[in-house]
Amino acid sequence: MQNFKKLAVTLAAATLGLAQAQTIAVTDLSYKKEVREFFYYEAASAKSSESGASSYKASGHDRSTSDYAASTSASATAAGGRNYGYANANVQANVASRQRNDKAFQEQSNSVYANSSESSYVKTFGDKVRVQYSELMGMSGDVRGALIRAGYKLMQARPSVAQNGETDQFFDVVGKIKNGQFAGAQYVLYGVVAAMEARGNREPIRGTNNFMYKSELNLTVDYSLIDTKTMQAVAAFTVMAVGDDNRIDGAQSTFRPSSAKMMKNAASELSEEVQKQLYAQGFLKNLAVQPPGGSGMPQPTYRDDPSTLKVYK
């Protein structure tokens, strides 16, 4: 019996030492969100242009006279009229010479004119889908704390920033490991948001004029635990967590649920579900919360439900 106790203590110490030696990085929750946006576009434009060209061409008469013909005419006149026939002949010759030097004008005119105009109008509207890749921060702190309490050394994971034109390559955790994004970690717990929705309603409370106002944040996360040496998934599971914020009020309530409270409650429940799954798949050796069904008595969960409320008068 004593030897058995010593063996149990030795195995427990070895298990604890192994857990303490192991390092793990827990990422923030990656998600893809499609944003649908309405767009409207209307525009009109007009433009015009004018151009013109003209040409003009003219010609005239060349009325130049010969100096020789003019002096001959003057000599004949100075003779006193004795040689009238000769003088008249010179005049006639001079006139004939002038006629031979006359040149007629020629006129020509060309003109071109062009005018053009153009107008356009466009109107369009509809929906466009824009895809966002990012990380949901503030939901993994309780998971990290639980792993520290279990004896693991936590390595800080660098945030993932989406690039312009990002694709589903954003979820490639193996590529991130190979790029050294989780340097020093033996394991990486990687979570992707599969669905997230917020809803609220109110239910009347029988026997009163009041209502139970219920608001919930439902979160579904797909997890993979990756061994950084072998790139194998040593654990994989999907968990769901709910964070709520409730209030009893009258019909004309101005109640506004607290998003911070719902996220805190959802993060706490998410941590419990992750621990249960890691324990069930053999990664955690001890469990601080109730294990999954079949490994122990289920613990009752208390939620505000109008059907369970009793009104005392």
Image (cartoon, rainbow, N blue to C red):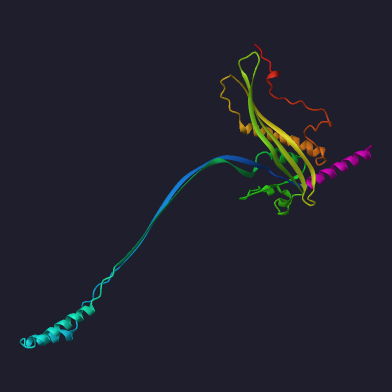
Asked if residue 125 is among those painted magenta in the image, a careful observer would answer no
Could you tell me if residue 258 is visible in this image? Answer: yes
Could you tell me if residue 183 is visible in this image? Answer: no
Percent from the top left, x then y, of residue 48?
40, 53
The span picked out in magenta is 1-21
Percent from the top left, x then y, of residue 50?
38, 56
Residue sitting at the far left: 80
Q: Of residues 138 and 169, which is closer to you in this image?
A: 169
Q: Is residue 286 left or right of residue 258?
A: right
Residue sitting at the far front: 85
Secondary structure mostly seen in magenta is helix
Q: Of residues 51 and 280, which is closer to you in this image?
A: 51
Asked if residue 17 is among those painted magenta in the image, a careful observer would answer yes
Residue at 81% over, 38% down: 279
Residue 244, quarter of picture: top right
Percent from the top left, x then y, of residue 90?
14, 85
Q: Of residues 144 and 83, which is closer to you in this image?
A: 83
Percent from the top left, x then y, of residue 281?
82, 40
Q: Where is 154 relative to 95, above or below?
A: above
Residue sitting at the far top: 313
Q: Is residue 294 left or right of residue 134?
A: right
State the quadrant of the N terminus: top right
Q: Give the total of numbered labels.
A: 0
State the quadrant of the C terminus: top right
Q: Where is 61 relative to 283, above or below?
A: below
Q: Is residue 10 left or right of residue 30?
A: right
